[in-house]
Image (cartoon, rainbow, N blue to C red):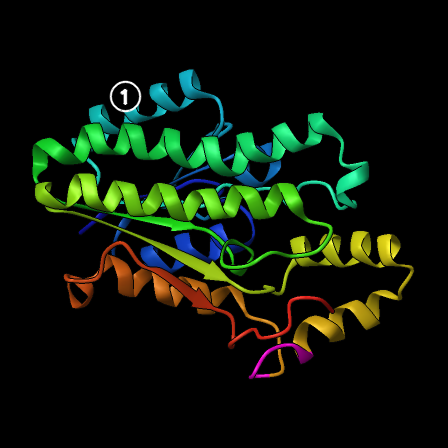
C-alpha cells in the first residue's frame, strides 16, 4: 500500500487522481484551498486545507504525514491556477507573481519537503502536473506558460539530483482537460479575442489529432502508471497526455 499525497486534490484533475490511487488500494492524503471541497473529500482519504505556495503550512503538513504515516511514497504536485488571460502589454505584474507562486513555487515546496522524507527511505516517486503549455507557448497565457515550463525544468533537475537515491520524477503535461478550469479559460480567452466560447472550445479540440479534449481520467491513468513499478526506469520525462496537440492557437 503506497502513501500518496496529492496537492490540489479535492477538485478537478487532483480529485480524479486521488480517487484513482485510492481505488488502487493506496492511502491518499489531499490538500486544497477550497474549504468546501476539502470537507467533501471521499471517506477514507485524509484531507487538509492548505495553500501549496505557503511553505510554513506545507512544512506543517509534511510533519503530520511523517507522524501519522511514517513516510511518503508518491507525491503528486498538482496545485495550479490558470492565471490571467491578457496580452503581454497588458499583463498585471501582481497576477503574474500569483500565478508563478501557486504553479511553480508550490511545486518546488512540495518537492523540497517530499525529498526530505524520501531520501532516507531510498525510494519515492514525484509526479508534477505541468501542461502542454509547458512544451510550447500559448497566446495570452504568459504567466501560466512560464510557470509550466519552469515546472518541467524543476522536475528534470529533481530527477537528476534524486535518482541516485532511488527517487524518480516525471511531469504529466495535460492538454485542455474537460472540467471547470477549462470552462474558465475558454470564457476568458473568448472575451480577450472577441470570439464565442463555443468557437474557442472547438478550436482547442480541432487542434488535436484525436479531435477532443482530454478527460481527467486520462491524466489519472498516466499518474498511476508513473507511480508503478512498470515505470521503474522512467524518470526525468515530460509526458503529454493531450491527444497530440498540434495547433496551440484556437
Left or right: residue 202 compared with residue 133: right
Residue 196, relative to residue 89: is it above or below?
A: below
> How many numbered marks does the figure carry?
1
Q: Residue at x 16, y 31 (%)?
A: 70
Residue 209 in the magenta stretch? The answer is yes
Where is residue 234 shown, x and y percent of the image? 21, 62
Quadrant of res 118: top left
Where is residue 225 shown, x and y percent of the image? 28, 65
Left or right: residue 125 compared with residue 141: left
Residue ID for mark 1? 63
Left or right: residue 107 compared with residue 148: left
Residue 22, relative to residue 177: is it above or below?
A: above
Q: Residue at x 76, y 59 (%)?
A: 186
Where is residue 131 shown, x and y percent of the image? 51, 56
In the structure shown, which secondary structural element does the residue marked by tag 1 occupy?
Answer: helix
Quadrant of res 30: top left
Q: Residue at x 28, y 28 (%)?
A: 113
Left or right: residue 145 compared with residue 180: left
Residue 101 in the magenta stretch? The answer is no
Write down the region rendered in magenta. 206-210
Dominant secondary-structure state across the stretch colored magenta: loop
Q: Which residue lies most toward the front here? A: 89
Instruction: State which quarter of the image contains the C terminus.
Output: bottom right
Q: Nearer the viewer, residue 58 or 233?
A: 233
Amino acid at each position: 500500500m503506497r502513501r500518496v499525497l496529492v496537492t490540489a486534490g479535492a477538485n478537478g484533475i487532483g480529485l480524479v487522481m486521488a480517487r484513482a490511487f485510492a481505488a488502487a488500494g493506496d492511502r491518499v492524503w489531499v490538500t486544497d484551498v477550497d474549504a468546501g471541497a476539502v470537507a467533501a473529500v471521499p471517506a477514507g482519504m485524509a484531507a487538509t486545507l492548505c495553500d501549496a505556495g505557503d511553505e510554513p503550512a506545507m512544512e506543517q503538513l509534511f510533519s503530520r504525514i511523517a507522524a501519522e504515516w511514517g513516510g511518503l511514497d508518491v507525491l503528486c504536485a498538482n496545485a495550479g491556477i490558470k492565471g490571467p488571460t491578457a496580452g503581454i502589454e497588458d499583463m498585471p505584474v501582481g497576477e503574474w507573481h500569483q500565478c508563478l507562486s501557486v504553479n511553480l513555487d508550490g511545486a518546488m515546496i512540495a518537492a523540497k519537503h517530499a525529498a526530505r522524507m524520501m531520501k532516507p527511505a531510498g525510494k519515492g516517486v514525484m509526479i508534477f502536473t505541468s501542461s502542454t503549455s509547458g512544451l510550447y507557448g500559448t497566446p495570452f497565457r504568459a504567466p501560466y506558460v512560464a510557470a509550466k515550463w519552469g515546472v518541467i525544468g524543476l522536475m528534470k533537475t529533481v530527477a537528476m539530483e534524486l535518482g541516485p537515491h532511488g527517487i524518480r520524477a516525471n511531469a504529466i503535461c495535460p492538454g485542455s482537460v474537460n472540467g471547470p478550469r477549462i470552462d474558465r479559460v475558454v470564457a476568458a480567452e473568448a472575451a480577450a479575442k472577441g470570439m464565442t466560447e463555443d468557437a474557442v472550445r472547438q478550436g482547442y479540440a480541432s487542434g488535436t489529432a484525436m479531435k477532443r479534449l482530454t478527460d481527467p481520467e486520462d491524466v489519472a491513468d498516466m499518474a498511476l502508471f508513473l507511480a508503478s513499478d512498470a515505470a521503474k526506469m522512467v524518470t526525468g520525462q515530460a509526458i503529454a497526455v493531450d491527444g497530440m496537440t498540434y495547433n496551440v492557437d484556437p
